[in-house]
Amino acid sequence: MKQEDLKVGMSVRIAVGHSSGHGGRIGYVTKKGKFKSFDGSLEVEGAKIDIQEPLLVLVESEHLEGVKKEDLPKGWAEYDL
């Protein structure tokens, strides 16, 4: 996926086999841009992805694909706890 196609709040799937160890997971974009790794040795152009765990995954834009968010059946609701 191209960097300019990413939008905050968009649902995305991380490419299978991604180096983060979270390949194949679906999450949503919380922030996009250029980010440095924790040790400062690597700069990545991509997005921070919320995968519904107590961490954000930093993923390069070319390792993301947009997915359609599945709608819940009528009468059901989804909440983040």
Image: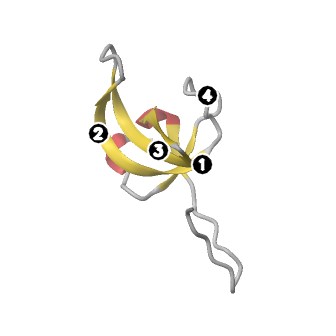
**Callout 4: SS:** loop
**Callout 3: SS:** strand
Q: Contact, CB < 8 Å: mark 1 with mark 2? A: no
Q: Which residue is mark 4?
A: 21
Up-down relation of residue 60 to residue 56 (above or below): above
Q: CA distance from mark 3 to mark 1?
A: 9 Å
Amino acid on which the number 2 mark rests in the picture: Gly
Disc sitting over residue 49 in the figure: 3
What percent of the width, then of the height, locates residue 72?
A: 67, 74
Picture colour scheme:
secondary structure
What percent of the width, then of the height, locates residue 63?
A: 50, 34
Q: CA distance from mark 4 to mark 2?
A: 21 Å
Q: CA distance from mark 3 to mark 4?
A: 13 Å
Q: Contact, CB < 8 Å: mark 3 with mark 2? A: no
Amino acid on which the number 3 mark rests in the picture: Ile
Q: Nearer the viewer, mark 3 or mark 2?
A: 3
Q: Which residue is mark 1?
A: 26
Is 32 displayed left or right of 14 in the figure? left
Residue found at x 56% / y 23% = 19
* Disc with the residue nearer the chain's start (3 vs 2): 2
Farthest top residue in view: 41
Residue found at x 36% / y 23% = 37
**Callout 1: SS:** strand
Q: Which residue is mark 2?
A: 33
* Disc with the residue nearer the chain's start (3 vs 1): 1
* Disc with the residue nearer the chain's start (1 vs 4): 4
